[in-house]
Image: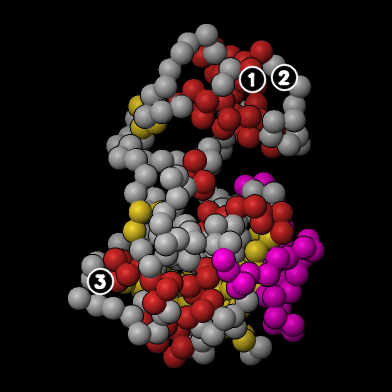
């Protein structure tokens, strides 16, 4: 059974949401995960469940794969957990003469991860694009010498580690992370008010702010779907693919999701449009 000698023991016991990998203050887990309760995320059919880094490490189930990005001359590495823990995103390690910067995070971290990254020069700063990827940012900060973690000020209310002194808020629209590194965080909004992308040389790291995805329906088509369904009561929804179930509040989640999409398409903040008939359905 594995353990960790490089990660503070108190960090190993902090509760982590299994679905989205957000870490909380602890020692007890909250009643629910505010990230998963948001309509942009989800609670799985099996319900909310929790783990810790101690459990994840001792299970011998997870490992981080750290490999150089093809065509980047050893200056960019990707970090991905196998099998996935939480949402399944990857992180990027960017190596510059001014210091190494990690863009976004995976929740899983162990001694092998710390040792491998230290062989590549360690980490001098972390930048996280939006709240879905905040994960275990305090643990990462402490494992690499209490390095700063940069988050958008607009999304401060989503931070779940209220005991943390690791994070620094980006208040400007554009901010270079380490002086003269050329690594620049840019607030583009959209997914969250403070959603960011990262620019370095001829590359952009998009996170969830820009995604390769099917083109969404136009606002009128979405409006028509909601209007047509408005007279019908439902709490549970079943999708076309395995795991696509909502077991509670399906109608409310559908309306909230439509509100977000149509509002963004029309340049209006969600919830601030004129109250249409179907929007009164909750």
Indicate the position of residue 181 as horizontal and vertical percent values.
Answer: 69, 82
Direction left: furthest residue: 1
Say which of 92 and 277 sits in front.
277
- From the viewer's perspective, is the residue at label 3 or at label 1 nearer? 3
The way the protein has been coloured in the rendering is secondary structure
Q: Is 74 a magenta residue? A: no
Q: Is disc 1 surrounded by few (<14), some (14 to 19) or many (20+) residues within 10 Å?
A: some
Q: Residue 195 carries which label?
A: none
Q: Is mark 3 on a helix, strand or loop?
A: helix
Q: Name the residue under label 3.
A: 58
Part of the protein shown in magenta: 163-191
In the rendering, which numbered label is found on residue 279? 1
Left/right of residue 279 with respect to residue 16 in the rendered view: right
Q: What element carries label 2?
A: loop
Q: In which image quadrant can residue 62 be found?
A: bottom left
Label 2 to label 3: alpha-carbon separation: 52 Å
2 and 1 marks in contact (CB < 8 Å): yes
Above or below, comparing residue 258 to residue 156 in the picture? above
**Residue 94 in view here:** no
Kindly identify which residue carries mark 2. Answer: 275
Residue at the image point whose x is 47% and y is 47% from the top = 33
Residue 169 painted magenta: yes
Position of 185 relative to 130 (above/below):
below
Q: Are the two marked residues, 2 and 3, in contact with CB atoms closer than 8 angstroms?
A: no
> Counting other residues with Cα less than 10 Å from the Cα at mark 3, is it few (<14), some (14-19), or many (20 or more)?
some
- Is any part of residue 180 visible from this angle? yes
Q: Distance between the residues labelled 3 and 1?
A: 48 Å
Quarter of the rendering containing residue 205: bottom right
* Magenta stretch prevailing secondary structure: loop
Residue at the right extreme, as displayed: 172
**Looking at the picture, how far across and down is residue 227, in whole percent?**
58, 14
Q: x and y percent of residue 161 in the render?
A: 55, 62
């Amino acid at each position: 059974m594995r353990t960790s000698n490089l990660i503070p023991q108190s960090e190993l016991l902090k509760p982590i949401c299994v679905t989205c990998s957000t870490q909380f203050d602890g020692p007890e887990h909250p009643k629910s995960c505010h990230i998963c309760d948001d309509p942009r995320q989800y609670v799985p059919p099996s319900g909310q469940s929790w783990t810790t880094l101690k459990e994840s490490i001792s299970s011998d189930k997870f490992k981080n794969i750290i490999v150089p990005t093809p065509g980047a001359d050893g200056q960019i590495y990707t970090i991905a957990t196998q099998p996935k823990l939480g949402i399944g995103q990857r992180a990027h390690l960017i190596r510059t003469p001014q210091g190494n910067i990690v863009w976004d995070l995976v929740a899983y971290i162990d001694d092998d991860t710390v040792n491998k990254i230290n062989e590549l020069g360690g980490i001098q700063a972390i930048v996280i694009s939006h709240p879905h990827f905040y994960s275990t940012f305090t643990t990462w900060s402490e494992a690499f010498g209490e390095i700063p973690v940069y988050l958008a000020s607009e999304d401060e209310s989503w931070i779940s580690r209220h005991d943390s002194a690791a994070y620094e808020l980006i208040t400007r629209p554009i901010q270079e992370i380490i002086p003269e590194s050329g690594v620049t965080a840019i607030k583009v909004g959209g997914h969250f008010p403070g959603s960011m992308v990262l620019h370095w040389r001829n590359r952009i790291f998009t996170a969830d702010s820009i995604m390769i995805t099917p083109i969404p329906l136009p606002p009128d088509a979405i409006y028509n779907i909601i209007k047509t369904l408005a007279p019908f009561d439902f709490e549970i929804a079943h999708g076309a693919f395995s795991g696509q179930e909502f077991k509670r509040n399906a109608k409310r989640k559908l309306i909230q999701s439509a509100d977000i999409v149509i509002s963004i398409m029309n340049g209006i903040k969600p919830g601030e449009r004129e109250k249409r008939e179907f929007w009164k359905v909750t």
